[in-house]
Amino acid sequence: MDPIKARELMEKAIEAMRQTVHEPRKDGKISPLVGVAILKPDGKVETACRGELRHGDHAEYTLLERKNNNSKLDNSFLFTTLEPCAPGSREPPKLSCSERIVIARIKEVWIGIEDPDPTVSHKGIIYLQENGVIVRIFPPDLQEIICQVNKEFLEHALERKEEASIAKEPKKAIQSAFEDANGRANFQDLSIEALNKYRIKTNIPDVLEAQSFKRRLIQQGLLVETNGEYKPAGYSLLLFGNRPRDVFPQAGLLGTIRYPSGAEETRDFNNPLILIPALVEEWIKNKMPTILDRNQMVSEELLDSFPYIIIREAVVNALIHRDYDITGAKCQFIVNEHMITIKSPGAPRSPITIEQMQAFNAPMLSRNPMLHYIFQQMGNAEERGLGLLSIKSAAEKYHLPVPKYTFEDPYLVLTIYTSQESAVEILSPEIRKLLNADEIKGWQLIASKTTISKSEYAKLMGFKLRKAQRHLSKFVELNLLSRIGEGPLTKYQVIRQ
């Protein structure tokens, strides 16, 4: 679909969302504001919102069943501000919105944000994809609008249990086996240190031994009670287990430091997931001066200037969003004098693409919402999204080359550059020989950008426009930049090496 037309329809869905009619509820639950828009094969566009024709009716139901009950909707495009509910989320015999979409033979569905409840999130998307529906996600700026309008709903959504009973088992969309209780472990296999850190960080008043604390974990889907015995779910073992790799060998993180001298230091982080980011940061901070400074002349300045938020966000992302069903690969953290490489098993989760990751504008979508929720509650992850903007903005603030995402099967690889000089050091020797001192300085500054114009580069370097153009043209010739647009609107996009 044409991007301009797609955005127009997304905005129509958001406009409809604002018209939501709130239903009176005795239980005090807060309902979301939801809007949908549909583009039919004949080119007609129609919208609906939650509660438009009757209190409590979902927007998709209103649009598909009440307004278009006798219409042929095959190959239509549907735009909805909230992930359609999945099978099993409504009281039988009611159908879920995702089932209605499949039955209507909708060709493609654009979704604003996921349902934020970690026990439900992404299951509507999974069901649609498994039934041949193409799923795409709204861009981040429109997602933010939806989140702001639904702020109160989102704040309360994770505090309440999902009201739906389980539908027929064959229809149920299962996101991960890690949601189930693990028969090889019990509550005593969880780390007291990790649980206490979680309790303190999230201001939970209950002590660990209290039934109320365990009940809270049950409500969050982290514990399962069976015949009076408390069994941790797989996600709970990953987050809080004393030794998660005893049960899940693919858990944890492998650290490697390669010093300029040729020496190598390794460390295996086999700890509960919530403890790993702080342990990695502590480990690397003590080593950073030796790694970065060949002559051992700078220490405190390097420590103070390096943005450790990039490492923290990158490690958290790798642990949260990796594919734990890939049992033969582990998260890796590799450091040398020019770069830090973080490898996380699993390609970007569909419908996110590697191109969106590299452009740092991937929509908010989590592979493991339970892990994401716990890290977010502890202040170690963005509430929604992948932390991409934090990584990119920190690199730009410190004038470091923009980090690079690639996919090297089976790993999603993030490369973080540790200094401005890294932008030149990672170039091939042949290209470096072709750059003079001014061009080297210019490339170091450009590498911290995503795009740049001739006038911006001239101002940055203190050059006249003609000299700035010569530099930019040479960078294009060396395949370091690519031209975007023509004439006065021409921009130059950095090609990540």
Image (tube, rainbow, N blue to C red):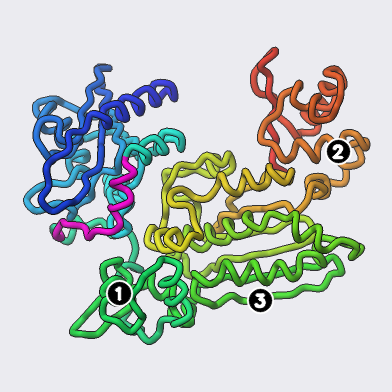
- Residue lying at the far top in this picture: please name it: 487
Q: Which residue is mark 3?
A: 267
Amino acid type shown at disc 2: Lys
Which secondary structure lies at badge 2? helix
State yes or no: residue 375 in magenta: no
Tell me, yes or no, whether the two marked residues, 2 and 3, touch with CB atoms within 8 Å.
Answer: no
**Residue placed at 41% from the left, 72% from the top?**
199
Answer with the quarter of the image where residue 450 lies.
top right
Q: Earlier in the sequence, mark 3 or mark 1?
A: 1
Tell me, yes or no, whether the two marked residues, 2 and 1, touch with CB atoms within 8 Å.
Answer: no
Q: Which residue is mark 2?
A: 441
Q: Residues within 10 Å of mark 2 (few under 14, many from 20)?
A: some
User: Separation of disc 2 and disc 3 at Cα?
Assistant: 36 Å
Amino acid type shown at disc 1: Leu
Image quarter of the N terminus: top left
Q: Which residue is mark 1?
A: 223
Judge by depth and name the residue closer to the eye, 393 or 320: 393
User: Separation of disc 2 and disc 1 at Cα?
Assistant: 55 Å
Q: Earlier in the sequence, mark 2 or mark 3?
A: 3
Amino acid type shown at disc 3: Arg
Q: Earlier in the sequence, mark 2 or mark 1?
A: 1
- Marks 3 and 1: which is nearer the front? 1
**Residue placed at 23% from the left, 78% from the top?**
225
Instruction: Name the spot of residue 4 as percent of width and height, x first.
Output: 43, 21
Q: Which residues are magenta?
A: 150-166
Q: Residues within 10 Å of mark 3 (few under 14, many from 20)?
A: few
Q: Give left or right: position of 267 versus 217.
A: right
Q: Give left or right: position of 429 versus 126.
A: right
Judge by depth and name the residue closer to the eye, 138 or 286: 286
Judge by depth and name the residue closer to the eye, 472 or 448: 448
Tell me, yes or no, whether the two marked residues, 3 and 1, touch with CB atoms within 8 Å.
Answer: no
